[in-house]
């Protein structure tokens, strides 16, 4: 059976992109990286893995609709059926959402609905909560909202700094995201 094709959207370091790439039996084939920051280190990671990359500058387009139309076209050209957001720091608009209904998944470093948006790890650390974690969810028009697929808790320990907490959260992300991707693909191929 041929594998479903997927794109990863990322804006930064790309450790989650790398974790998906390094998964031995990923149930989909990652055929495209989409990146909105021309200096992001995820671009180098994709080049090393020989994954084609589409880099765009949102400011060069008249609107979100305009760049998302182009993204939809790029995704359709390579027969992508799933989109995995991995540190993509933009709100996805109706153009992409309608083209890939229930096929766009995000990972976020908190137990949503707590600490949405930017710097979720710092927000949790500074708030004094004892537990934070990781959420994988389908996206909608909101910021880190949409139906939750999976969550895993991470305790904030008394000796933690933001850096040590981030390290443990990312370890959880790198195991959870590939696992959820595989579960989603396997359950959707049963229909
Ligand atoms: C990850 O921790 C991801 O959960 C987060 O950005 C980081 C990207 O790291 N996403 C969000 O905050 C989405 N709101 P990476 O580039 O090393 O994968």
Image: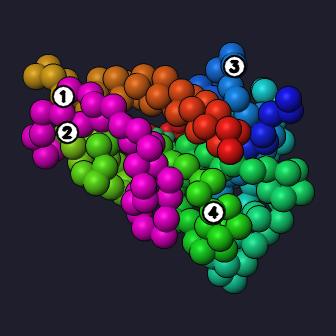
**Which numbered tag is attached to residue 101?**
4
Give the residue at the far top of this rendering: 24
* Left or right of 111, for residue 20: right
**Residue on which the image places disc 3:** 25
* Quadrant of the image occupied by residue 45: top right
Q: Residues within 10 Å of mark 4 (few under 14, many from 20)?
A: some
**Residue on which the image places disc 1:** 156
Q: CA distance from mark 3 to mark 4?
A: 25 Å
Q: Residues within 10 Å of mark 1 (few under 14, many from 20)?
A: many
Magenta stretch bounds = 126-155
Can residue 181 be seen in this snapshot?
Answer: no
**Residue on which the image places disc 2:** 125
Front-most of residues 145 and 117: 145
In terms of sequence position, does the residue under pointer 4 or pointer 2 come before the other?
4
Q: CA distance from mark 1 to mark 3?
A: 32 Å
Residue at screen point 87% across, 50% down: 78
In terms of sequence position, does the residue under pointer 2 or pointer 1 come before the other?
2
46 is higher (above) or lower (below) than 105: above
Determine whether the residue tagged by mark 3 lies in a helix, strand or loop. loop
Query: Residue 64 in magenta?
Result: no
Can residue 65 be seen in this snapshot?
Answer: yes
């Amino acid at each position: 059976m041929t594998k479903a094709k997927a794109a990863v959207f990322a804006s930064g370091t790309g450790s989650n992109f790398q974790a998906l790439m390094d998964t031995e039996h990923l149930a989909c084939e990652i055929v495209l990286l989409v990146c909105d920051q021309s200096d992001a280190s995820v671009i180098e990671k994709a080049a090393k893995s020989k994954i084609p990359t589409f880099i765009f500058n949102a400011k060069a387009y008249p609107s979100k609709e305009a760049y998302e139309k182009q993204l939809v076209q790029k995704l359709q050209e390579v027969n992508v059926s799933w989109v995995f957001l991995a540190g993509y720091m933009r709100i996805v608009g109706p153009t992409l959402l309608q083209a890939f209904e229930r096929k766009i998944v995000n990972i976020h470093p908190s137990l949503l609905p707590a600490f949405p948006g930017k710097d979720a790890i710092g927000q949790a650390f500074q708030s004094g909560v004892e537990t934070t974690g990781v959420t994988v969810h389908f996206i909608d028009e909101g910021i880190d909202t949409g139906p939750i697929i999976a969550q895993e808790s991470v305790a904030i320990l008394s000796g933690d700094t933001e850096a040590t907490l981030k390290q443990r959260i990312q370890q959880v992300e790198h195991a959870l995201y590939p696992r959820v991707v595989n579960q989603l693909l396997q359950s959707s191929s049963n229909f």
